Amino acid sequence: MEYETFARAVQQDAALRRRQVLQPIGGKGDKIFPPTYPEERRGQGPRHVFERRRIDGREVWCVLVDSVQSQANRLEESLLAALRQGAVSLPHVTVDFRDAGLSGLAEITSLEAPHRVYDAILRDSLLDGTPFMKSPLGLRLAEAKPGDATALLEASPNALLFGAWHSTGEGGGLGAKFPRCLVSEIIAVEVPVEDGPADPRSGEIEVRTAGRRTGSRIDPLGILRRVEVFKGQDGWDTNKDRAGKGAKLVRPSEINHGNIAPSVEPLGITCDYAEHMAVLSFAGLRRLRFGGGERDGAGRAYLAALGLLALSEQDECGYALRSRCDLVCDGRAPLELVHPDGTVDRVEIDGVAARALYAASFEAAVKAGFRLSAEPVRLAPQPKLVEIVQRSQKLALEGEGGEAEPQG
């Protein structure tokens, strides 16, 4: 598709979408392991997310394999990989940790940070010695609105494509919100289920997978459970005094020794097929403005080309989602251009064409007056940010890191 045709579609049509059928890489019917989520009540155990969806006129059991949020992260990772390969130019912000002496940490970009360009990692960094959000660029980003989103497009266009919220902005968290224009999700369809135990309070029976995951560990040292071990401030020992302050009697398994008895949990699924659904909303992009006229059209076309590039680059990376959850395309599905009346036209765009279309849109945006740089905006972490990471790494090395904060 030529750039002019694509730009016209962004201005006139409803969306670009694709429904890609996937199968386990081990073959149809092979077991896969979707993400697990914490138990809702004590004793329930980890669980998958089940939904009844209307598909082909029937209600069928489906399981979430990759959420919208997870897919956004993967799409951004694929863009970052293409950027680091030198295959594309993409404006972004990066926090450079290379001079901070932190183990295993070189940089964090606005393509990786959870809240993108508005993330705390960037906020707690410096641009030319000034706190980022108080710098000229930071102030422009703080003032950005859908009615004038130029600052975001020039500094971190992925924030407009995948959504962003300046949660610490004006009005006590009422800063600018940019809804996502690209929605991508993977589900498993026609999943065998069974009734789980009833909720003791409500009597409600929750559905769970008919699949099972087993686990066990045989200790090659043959350490038995009845051996007395003490765990304290100085580590563990068979002598309570040598274990240090606060030493308590624990099982060998609590210091990662001894056997772990076999266990069986209702986890893992089989399905008829998995489906990757992606929708790039042109109507959503048209809510964004960049100064009117040619700039609006060029900015929206650039973002649309970026979304198409992200999908294409993810195709190249493949669907290795997590341990025992590798998927592969069951034949390549075409893109569909959705017109305002709901009719569709098939669109064939491969990876080479997607990169060429993105390059043309980048050039057109520059000609329209956008300041798009191939070089990132480089930030330096504030000393307090470096210190909190150093302390966390020290605790982790000492085995005292604890768990991450729960999601509120």
Image (cartoon, rainbow, N blue to C red):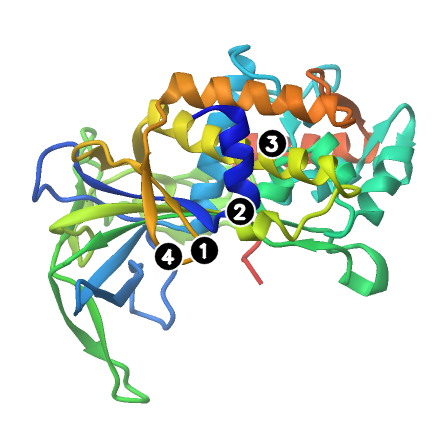
Q: Label 4: which residue?
A: 342
Q: Find residue 322 and report its horizontal and vertical position in percent.
A: 32, 37
Disc 4: CA contacts within 10 A as few (<14), some (14-19) or many (>=20): few
- State if disc 2 and disc 1 touch (CB < 8 Å): yes
- The Cα atoms of the two marked residues, 4 and 2, are separated by 13 Å
Viewer can see residue 201: yes
Disc 2: CA contacts within 10 A as few (<14), some (14-19) or many (>=20): some
Viewer can see residue 246: no
Q: Which one is earlier in the sequence, the residue at label 1 or at label 2?
A: 2
Q: Label 1: which residue?
A: 340
Check the image and report above or below for 264 versus 39. Answer: above
Task: Name the residue type under label 3.
Answer: Tyr
Q: Which mark is residue 34?
A: none
Q: How many marks?
A: 4
Q: Secondary structure at mark 2?
A: helix
Classify residue 266 as left or right of residue 339: left
Disc 1: CA contacts within 10 A as few (<14), some (14-19) or many (>=20): few
Q: Which mark is residue 12?
A: 2
Q: Secondary structure at mark 4?
A: loop
